[in-house]
Image (spheres, coloured by chain):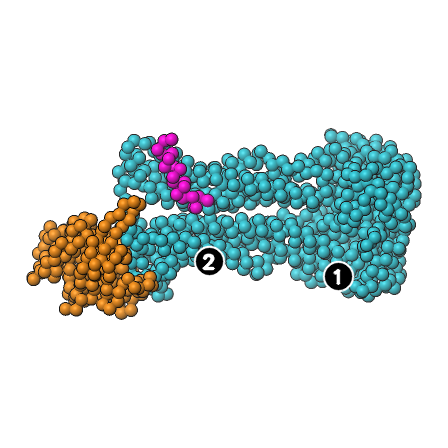
Chain colours: A cyan, B orange
Amino acid sequence: MRALDRKLIRDLRRIWAQGLAIALVLACGLMVLVMADGTLRSLDQTLNAYYERQRFADVFASATRAPDDITPLIAGLEGVAQAETRIVGAAILDLPGMMEPASAKVISLPASGQPKLNLPLLRAGRLPDPLRPDEVLLMEPFALANGLMPGTGVDVTLNGQRRHLTVTGHVLSPEFVYSIGPGSIMPDDKHFGIIWINEASLAAATDLSGAFNDVTLALRREADPRKVIAALDHLLAPYGGTGAYARARQTSHMFLNSEMEELGTIAVSMPPIFLIVSAFLVNMVLGRLIRLERAQIGLLKAVGYSAREIGWHYLKLSIGIGVGGVVLGVASGWWAGHGMTQMYTEFFRFPWLIYVPGVRAIALAVVLGLATVVIGALRAVAASVGLPPATAMSPPAPPVFQRGWVDGFGRLARLRQTTMMILRSILRWPGRAAITFFGVAASVAVLVSCFFIFDTMDLLMDEMFVQSNRQDVTLVLNQNKGTVAATDAATLPGVRRVEGGFALPVRLIHGPVERLSTLQARENGTELTQLLDEGGKVITLPENGLILPERLAEKLGVTVGSQMQVALLAPPRETWTVSVSAVIRQSLGDEVHMSKPALFRLMRADAQVNQLNLSVDPQALPRLMATAKATPVIAGLIYWPDVKGQIDATINESLRIMTVIFSTLGMLIALGVVYNAARIQLSERAHELATLRVLGFSRGEVGYVLVGEILLLAVLAIPVGWGLGYVFARAINTGFSTDIISMPFDIRPRSFAIAAGLVLVTATGSAFWVRRRLDRVDLVSALKQKE
Amino acid sequence: MQPIMQAHAVTKVYKTGAVEVQALRGIDMSLNAGELVVLLGASGSGKSTLLNILGALDTPTSGAVQFKDHELGAMSEAQLTNFRREHVGFVFQFYNLVPALTARENVALVTEIAQNPMRPEEALERVGLGHRMHHFPAELSGGEQQRVAIARAIAKRPELLLCDEPTGALDSATGVTVLEALVEVNRDLGAATVLITHNAAIRQIAHRVIHMADGQIAREEVIANPVPPSEVSW
């Protein structure tokens, strides 16, 4: 081995702690990159393969009742490769040992057995016998959550008729990779499932013999989905078509897509913070090392090494640190990606999810990691190798300090000289101070943008379950009823208050833009469900006109006062021109609202209800549930405490894991920056600090000079970190919002305080860790070293 | 005169790896209040080691060092720090000024923590630098820097002033101004002053000269009539 390489290895060994601190920060950035990209690729590849194998449809539509005669017309539409009609219904399940009813979506299986599109994938048991009307398939997670193994029976209320059905098998479906029940935003396997049943059986139960109410299409490669959707809508309009939509608006796919977008955002936005900090750290540490080795560089040049050879030697040193960071980052990213993928397997219902970390991301991590350290080192290396040997071998000129505002300030504030040393050092080396300053700020920002999620979630939960939806139970009726239904419901066991609700599917049209949505009738003075404005106050409903959620209004391009068309997709199937009277930020759902009198005036009908919101005495809940299970008109039931519990559990699980990971990453930045800054301070000022000890300063007083500068910078950086964190959090919040969930935004003072506290503790800990070395400095020899 | 500092049978052994270096081999000496003593000897004769032990920068391997009634060996770390803070002034060959502080501030560094200091301005005027007090070390010549170091050492009104080759890095003309400053403060403040040098000419300014060789006191010499530094040349 060449002597210079031997030196390299010994140098690396000597600065291992500082090198490790840098490598850790670098590793954080690369880990996030490899993890997010690997998980994204795994999801993407799995999804594509799954969709293809199970022939996931491209277009979806529902109607009230369309005759089977039009099936050939649908199949013959230009661009359609395959069309499949089916019957979709809703059912309530009375499960043994469960007080509240579970609800399910029921989907028909063609007489041939297997559908042509959206093939359920058999996981256990067998397909139902086409000749047996009582055999069903269940969605696997729902079956497992409720212990419904193949061969067991289950009591189902289907369109008002109670039936005893036998489970023959468990399946997964590309339509329900992410399946959520009505009113929820998280999957709830215990309370919501999918049932597949023979078509004849379901047709009989729903009175749809010779007809269908749902259709899915696979399109030809060259087809224009918008044209197909328009043609399909035209065909289904007479039969109560509620508007066709493409795959992009299919619930399960939409959730998956937004999750993947979030991962993409993380992969792009997080790593640069860490990479930039690492580059500066390398610059700082290597810069110091090279200054210390100035005389050696001069010597190497004097004996005939070229500037290139010496430059390359120091670049290799930085690459050594970089290699450490890359290995740590790629390995931990690989591992974390594996963990994330497993988490997704539980959250999303894939039959398989193989972790395929992208070679591209790993290659990118290697290149970025090494480029980061090399770029960080370049300036320090260039400055040193350029010196003529004689200059390099003589000691560097002492630092020049200048008088400035700080002198006046120091006198005025009667600052101690040790404090003046701190202030002058910051002003003398502003670049180095800036690295510490922004490193700490970045650390605070990462933590704030991590903790804010809890505040926002709390706010979302509060809006959803305390402010907007205060009902305990929502009953979904299988048909529109007069308002007398609400009066009837008041007599159900334990019901304290009933408020009727009415919703109907609509198509919103503004110029060329169309959106499917649900129109909700609202009343002033309701207690159980309320619409809130931005500040969380209950909205007084405008007498006329539509209230739109912000995101929907944005997509449609309407503002308050705009006129737009509302096409009812249920009787009376009219199209109205209505003005927008308010735009609100709505946390959950994309439904639009109108005051009840205005709606029924437009419908020229008496007020009706198709859902009932109840406030219930908890004691009587079991009796209410039992009654609901046996009441034919009730098509579905939402038990709000369960919905909340499910969301809470999900938040607890996944969010906390993410928070631990990201706050560790955030604190590692502070550790890397402060540890290195303190080590450099110690190395540069050992002489000066020893002098202070000789002059009679105690260890504590000398420690103050070493640690004080760093902690002063850290304290000053905190407000900047808060500001940056606020900006990051805003961006993340926007990223989390989807068409269905519009995240409210809140950062509580507590989160700012915890972020600042954690960073200060990390910074103080790192600085004092270095300060301990001060105790080991031998005064006599430190005094003899002349810089 | 009353001795303020006494060393008895002091030895010092440095161990570096397997090598043992006997730096001091049984030193007995005492130092009287107000006395100016020159420690003279070649490199490696043990002068600096002795000075460091007297100033509590280092501890003897064996033997005792007493400051007035206090045994240094019995003092805790904090007490030793306090001993240096209140009673000892140091002047080093390479000045050891804090580059980030002006001349006045370098002196104030010490006066802020001492119990009965003089004003920094007064200390600087004593060494003839009243007009340069707002300059940073980098803006001062070597002699000026050393005089700032002397001002810093005397500002606490020390009873013991320890100078390790204070003129070692200076040319002879500049060295004279530094020695003059030292002689003046020794006379005016009455601090017992120990001055290390390997330059035999300088010994003439002292009251007493201790010749060291090979870690031992070779001989002592009393100078009946010390000469002013301006008459010394080297």
Check if residue A13 falls in the magenta segment: yes
The residue drawn where x is 73% and y is 44% is: A178
- Is residue A762 rendered to the left or right of residue B197? right
Judging by the rendered image, the residue that carries numbered circle 2 is A715
Magenta stretch: helix, strand or loop mostly: helix
Secondary element at image label 1: loop
In percent of the image, x 79 and y 43: which residue is there?
A139
The amino acid type of the residue labelled 1 equals Arg
Left or right relative to A331: residue B216? left
Residue A595 at x, y percent in the picture: 79, 58
Q: Is residue B140 visible?
A: no
- Neighbourhood count class around disc 1 (C-alpha, 10 Å): few under 14, some 14–19, many 20 upward: some
What numbered label is drawn on residue B140? none
Output the chain of dot 2: A
Quote the CA–CA distance across marks 2 and 1: 44 Å
Residue with the mark numbered 1:
A470
Look at 83% across and 52% down and name the residue there.
A95
Residue A665 percent coordinates (x, y): 53, 48
**Amino acid type at mark 2:** Val
Residue A440 among magenta residues: no
Question: x, y (%) of residue A522?
Answer: 78, 58
Chain part drawn in magenta: A1-20
Q: Quadrant of the N terminus of chain A?
A: top left
User: How many numbered marks have been drawn onto this rendered protein structure?
Assistant: 2
